[in-house]
Amino acid sequence: MVVVPLTQPEKHSKIERISSAVESTNWARVAAGGGLLAGGLLLLTGNKKAALVAAASGTALAMLDQQETVKAWWNSLPGYIDTVQQLLGQVEQTVAEVAAQRERMHRILTK
């Protein structure tokens, strides 16, 4: 004869633990945001040099906190540069064509 143990369902209390829902504060993000905010406020008050220092420190902290994002942007940057370079080449070609047509129109009208 085989004995099969009957499991009892776990009793869940209706009270959830609050400590599991609390996330730890990311102080690097707070400091980065504070630096950027202080830079903006200093710029509004006319302290340009102090604003630049505060904004640069806030940006540096944000970049340190988001290293993976910065790496992804840095790796995708050459593709964007190539796209912009192609676009500028097309604009240059279009401007050259418009200049040539303008010169032809000028010759025709001055005869």
Image: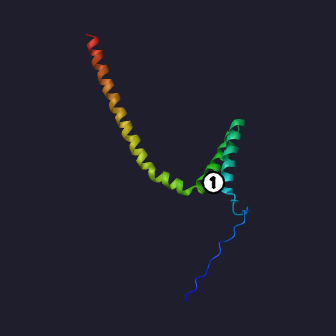
Q: Is residue 61 above or below residue 102?
A: below
Local packing at callout 1 (Cα closer than 10 Å; few below 14, some 14-19, many 20+) is some
Q: Residue at x 33, y 30 (%)?
A: 94
Q: Report the residue that reaches farthest toward the top.
A: 111
Q: What scheme was used to colour the molecule?
A: rainbow
Q: Is residue 2 above or below residue 108?
A: below
Q: Residue at x 69, y 58 (%)?
A: 25
Taking the image as shown, residue 95 lies to the left or right of residue 68, namely: left
Q: Residue at x 53, y 54 (%)?
A: 69
Q: Nearer the viewer, residue 66 or 5?
A: 5
Measured as percent of width and height from the top left, residue 105 is found at 29, 16
Measured as percent of width and height from the top left, residue 87 is found at 38, 37
Task: Specify the quadrant that holds the C terminus.
Answer: top left
Q: How many marks?
A: 1
Taking the image as shown, residue 79 lies to the left or right of residue 100, namely: right
Q: Quadrant of residue 102?
A: top left
Q: Residue at x 32, y 28 (%)?
A: 96
Taking the image as shown, residue 49 lies to the left or right of residue 72, namely: right
Measured as percent of width and height from the top left, residue 45 is found at 72, 36
Q: Quadrant of residue 61?
A: bottom right
Q: Nearer the viewer, residue 73 or 15?
A: 15
Q: Nearer the viewer, residue 8 or 104?
A: 8
For badge 1, the amino acid type reads: Leu
Measured as percent of width and height from the top left, residue 5 is found at 61, 82
Q: Is residue 36 above or below residue 44?
A: below
The residue tagged with tag 1: helix, strand or loop? helix
Task: Specify the quadrant that holds the N terminus.
Answer: bottom right
Residue where numbered disc 1 is placed: 61
Taking the image as shown, residue 45 lies to the left or right of residue 4, namely: right
